[in-house]
Amino acid sequence: MRPDLLFFRKGDLRDFLEYKKLELKKEVERYDSNYILNVSEEDFCQYLVSKYSLKPPKIYEDKIYVYSQKEVDVDVSRDSMRPIFVKGVQIIIAVPFEGDGELFQYRPSGFTFNPPRGEVVGKEIHLIYEMVEHNAERLKQECQQELNEIKEYLEWVERDVNAFNGSLDQFVRQLISQRKKKLLDDLRLVSSLGIPIKPREDMPTTYTIPSIRKKPKFEPPRVSGETFKPEPALVLEEYENILEMIYNMALIMERSPRTFSKLREEEIRDHFLMMLNAHYEGQATGETFNYGGKTDILIRVEDKNVFIAECKFWKGEKKLVEAIDQLLGYTSWRDTKTAILLFNKNQNFSSVLAKIDPTVKSHVCYKRDWSLKSDKLKSETIFT
């Protein structure tokens, strides 16, 4: 085996992974304020996580083959100062792999003091053997030993990389949140001065998407080129408070089935509106026009929508998908807090619950699950 070709020798994998996070942070900081404040935080997060996630290499021993064989001069002296060359043979054995080849260069947290040898060529690792004797059995043993050592190293690499990938989502969300908070604080500072702001003449109307050489399939989400203007927004705690009020009203209905079982959809909705208006000073309305149609429940603050809900009886998965489409059709880009209130008259309620989750997650606009902080809501089946 060529002694000068060592895998996992360039540096520590830990340092390489920290450098990747530093690159990620710099990329977030490169985007201008309008992009950060206008872009969908979820889409931007998914883009960055996808771009910076690493794929641990996996070798395919079943696809191993002899890449080349040729006559070479072999140093048999074992003394680099006074080499003695004789004619021998060089055999290169190629092993295909998938994953990020650069990870063969860095030493994982687990390692030995005699790392395996070889080189990365494209999507293959090449094991290079130079010998004078024609001993096929010895060559097979050396090759298998080298492969076993490489696989052991790759297990250590996979462990470190999986930990890195698992930390990216939270790391990215913190970066975006911190940068967005800083930019909003900047805007509030300037606004509090009470001095007119001169608009920039060089403000771009569109955003050029940067090219990604390593993984061109990932593109950052597009946003409008308009200057960001803060909108009234419903904080998460208040959103959960609204959901709790809806939940409490649902409990009342469950405990008084005779009173509510014969009510129509609109009449049931009105009971929710009464409870919401008791807390929001008449700002909750029903059958209100908004964007592309009329929504069942709407809460407005300063003439801006902060909560939109749609009431529906359960009539199967297809109707639920239609209800989601209908709700999304009502919402504009600034409407971020929504809900669907599903009423069920079927006896097999467990079967209905089992169908809701996969139906929601199969929708084309589904992003991710959202964990609610409310202890009351955590104990119930809530889909957000």
Image: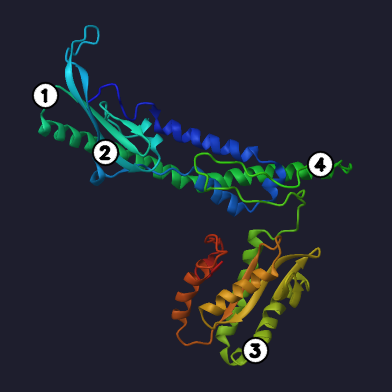
Earlier in the chain: of badge 3 and badge 2, it is: 2
Name the element at disc 1: loop
Q: Which of these two is toward me, 73 or 380?
A: 73
Q: Residue at x 55, y 84 (%)?
A: 254
Q: Residue under circle 2?
A: 152
Report the Cα–Cα distance between label 4 and label 3: 51 Å
Q: Which image quarter holds the N terminus?
A: top left
Q: Taking 38 as reference, is 372 left or right?
A: left
Earlier in the chain: of badge 4 and badge 1, it is: 1
Q: Nearer the viewer, mark 4 or mark 1?
A: 1
Determine which quarter of the picture holds residue 30: top right
Q: Position of residue 282 (x, y in %)?
A: 78, 74
Q: Residue under circle 1?
A: 133
Q: Position of residue 251 (x, y in %)?
A: 57, 79
Residue 332 against residue 47 in the figure, above or below: below
Report the Cα–Cα distance between label 1 and label 3: 91 Å
Q: For the residue marked with disc 1, what is the amino acid?
A: Glu
Earlier in the chain: of badge 1 and badge 3, it is: 1
Report the Cα–Cα distance between label 2 and label 1: 29 Å
Earlier in the chain: of badge 4 and badge 3, it is: 4
Report the Cα–Cα distance between label 4 and label 2: 57 Å
Q: For the residue marked with disc 3, what is the amino acid?
A: Arg
Q: Residue under circle 3?
A: 264
Q: Position of residue 166 (x, y in %)?
A: 44, 47
Q: For the residue marked with disc 4, what is the amino acid?
A: Val
